[in-house]
Amino acid sequence: PHLYGRMDLAYAGNGPAKLYELNYDTPTSLYESAYFQWLWLEQQIAAGALPKGTDQYNLIQDLLCETLGALAVDGAIGAQMHFSAVRDSLEDRATVRYLRDCAHQVGISTEEVAIEDIGLSAEGWFTDEQDRVIHTLFKLYPLEFMMEERFGPALCANRVRLIEPAWKSVLSNKGILPLLWERHQG
């Protein structure tokens, strides 16, 4: 299962927009785009700068909750979902906490675990710091870095459901952009 991604585009005001980056493995800016824009809108309405009933064009939070809910109903998530980022990355942890809140809104039980605290059970399951098995893991951490962690060699054989999945790391690799440009200049 996959949840979301971010395309970074550059636009000079004329001609087509240019693709700058595909960030599908570790997309951030979500908290700012979904949550803070909504807060700003509410504050502007409260201050009288915008009329009551004003809405935004941004449905990010609604669609995240809808997608998480659909994944839960389809059985793609399981009974519990772990969310993970690097312990010292405040931006990544804020994004993970925001996503956990979205998951809670649709009834998904969640836990947070720092990437550094992920372990491996004797049976080959990923575990959190309480030795709970991680069945589904949203990881805001590059897959190629995960392969270098102590639990990395078990990734290929492990039964953990990764969100975002491995195919997204291929699209996020900076090496793909020159290949795309070669085929589709413009």
Image: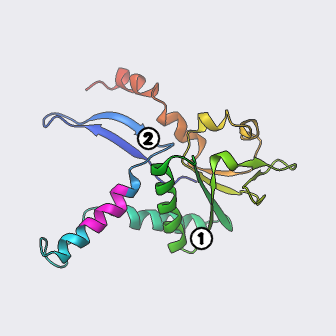
User: The disc labelled 1 sits on which kind of residue?
Assistant: Ile
Residue 23: which numbered mark, if any?
Answer: 2
Above or below, 17 relative to 110 = above
Residue 108: which numbered mark, if any?
Answer: 1
- Residue at 40% x, 57% y: name it: 31
- Residue at 47% x, 56% y: name it: 94
The quadrant of the picture occupied by the C terminus is top left
Above or below, 149 relative to 28 = above
Q: x, y (%) of residue 178?
A: 39, 22
The quadrant of the picture occupied by the N terminus is bottom right
**Dominant secondary structure, magenta:** helix
Q: How many marks?
A: 2
Q: Dot 2: few (<14), some (14–19), or many (≥20) neighbours within 10 Å?
A: some
Above or below, 108 relative to 8 = below
Magenta region: 32-40
Q: Is residue 145 left or right of residue 34?
A: right
Separation of marks 1 and 2 at Cα, in angstroms: 25 Å
Q: Is residue 76 visible?
A: no
Q: x, y (%) of residue 108?
A: 59, 70
| Among numbered discs 1 and 2, the one appearing first in the sequence | 2
